[in-house]
Amino acid sequence: MKEINQIGLTLISFFSYAFTGALVVVTGMIMGNIANYFNLSIAQMSNTFTFLNGGILISIFLNSWLIEIISLKKQIIFGFILTIISIIGIVFFKNIFLFSVSMFILGLVSGITMSIGTFIITSLYSGAKRSSRLLLTDSFFSMSGMIFPIITATLLEKKILWYWIYICIGLVYLIIFLLTINLNFTQLKNKIKSINQKKERCNTNIVLLSIAALLYILGQLGFISWVPQYVTEYMHVNIQKTGSLVSSFWMSYMVGMWCFSFVIKFFNLHRILIFLTSISTIFMFCFIHSQNFLLQQCMIISLGFFSSAIYTIIITLASLQTKNPCPKLINLILLFGTIGTLLTFVVTSPIVEKKGLYASLISSNILYSIVFMLSILIYLNTKDKKIT
């Protein structure tokens, strides 16, 4: 019975990342449709989606303390209620203010749920199993990235209103809710009490890993969010091909996570992080400077595969910096990653508006190269190079 409960809790972690992934990934594909729906420019609409990212950021920041006050089970149940309310607001009210509020609420829910999901994995598993399970968990973010662009492209092609994609995303949280009400969270509750009695000191590598998480997510989402517009404008392809390109990235990202969840057990995490950040930077550079759609597809598939484990390795390395990975430490990395998400359109929209789509993709490439340099610095700054 205990084993079944652990599997169920692990599934909650998987679907928590799937929910957040779906919300973030579809943004680039439906932005134009929503802008037309509200009679706004794409630049104005992209700023509106900052409410989604802001909600995720605030919820992860607050959940470091909220997790000690409100039980994980109650947080998820309350999150389900908020999800229903926000989807109703999106579907039935054609008002940009209410849309922004609804996106903010969805951001709050997804941030809290993702934070809970990450904590569940770091609490239930240790050592090599932890990094492996974290990769599998993050792969569900990618799975959403593969599935939901296809669903979105199909809905748009059939002239179905864009907001139906959020109804589909809501079904993911329904699965989380159904799992939650049938599982026992006592083991995690005891873990939180035990961790709160111990104090862990921060070190330089945690700071460097936090910065790396921010820049990596900003670079990744800045790249993939504008790829549809870039390919449509410069390669003159239709929405179906654009959707397949984005889906190819997330599909290879997901497959990469599955592969690395096995491979990662045999390599030093610091060294594999250096390798993955370097080769990902190269593949992104090749994609941006390619004039052939087929070659671009090969490059984006390769980029997705080799960059898939970067964020999870960063989280794993941070959790290994202390003997007892507390919610505050895990949330710190998630917080910086979410700041990267929040800054995606804040940083890239002005670049697109003033310099164009090409410059925006180049800026993402530069961010990847900085993460590569940080990974080297983290490796050199690590006293124990045997962490695996």
Image (spheres, rainbow, N blue to C red):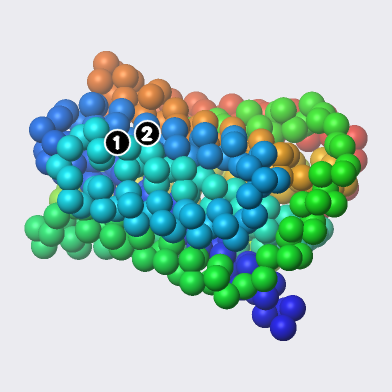
* Up/down of 57 relative to 292, above or below: above
**Residue at the spot 40% in from the left edge and 51% down from the top edge:** 82
The percent position of residue 249, horizontal first and vertical second, equals 41, 53
**Residue at the spot 15% in from the left edge and 42% down from the top edge:** 94
Look at the numbered discs 2 and 1 and tell me whether their residues touch, using CB distance below 8 Å.
yes
The percent position of residue 307, horizontal first and vertical second, equals 55, 47
Crowding around mark 1 (Cα neighbors within 10 Å: few <14, some 14 to 19, many 20+) is: many
**Residue at the spot 73% in from the left edge and 39% down from the top edge:** 329
In the shown orientation, is residue 239 left or right of residue 64? left
* Residue type indicated by callout 1: Ser
Q: Which mark is residue 51?
A: 2
According to the picture, the residue beneath numbered tag 1 turns out to be: 100
What kind of element bears circle 2?
helix
The percent position of residue 290, horizontal first and vertical second, equals 33, 39
* Residue type indicated by callout 2: Phe
Does residue 165 appear in the picture of this structure?
Answer: yes
Does residue 273 appear in the picture of this structure?
Answer: no
Q: Quadrant of residue 49?
A: top left
In the shown orientation, is residue 51 left or right of residue 141? left
Task: Work out whether residue 307 or residue 207 is closer to the camera in this orientation and state it.
Answer: 207
Q: Quadrant of residue 8?
A: bottom right
In the shown orientation, is residue 167 left or right of residue 346? left
Task: Work out whether residue 154 or residue 12 is closer to the camera in this orientation and state it.
Answer: 12
**Residue at the spot 24% in from the left edge and 48% down from the top edge:** 90
Q: How many marks?
A: 2
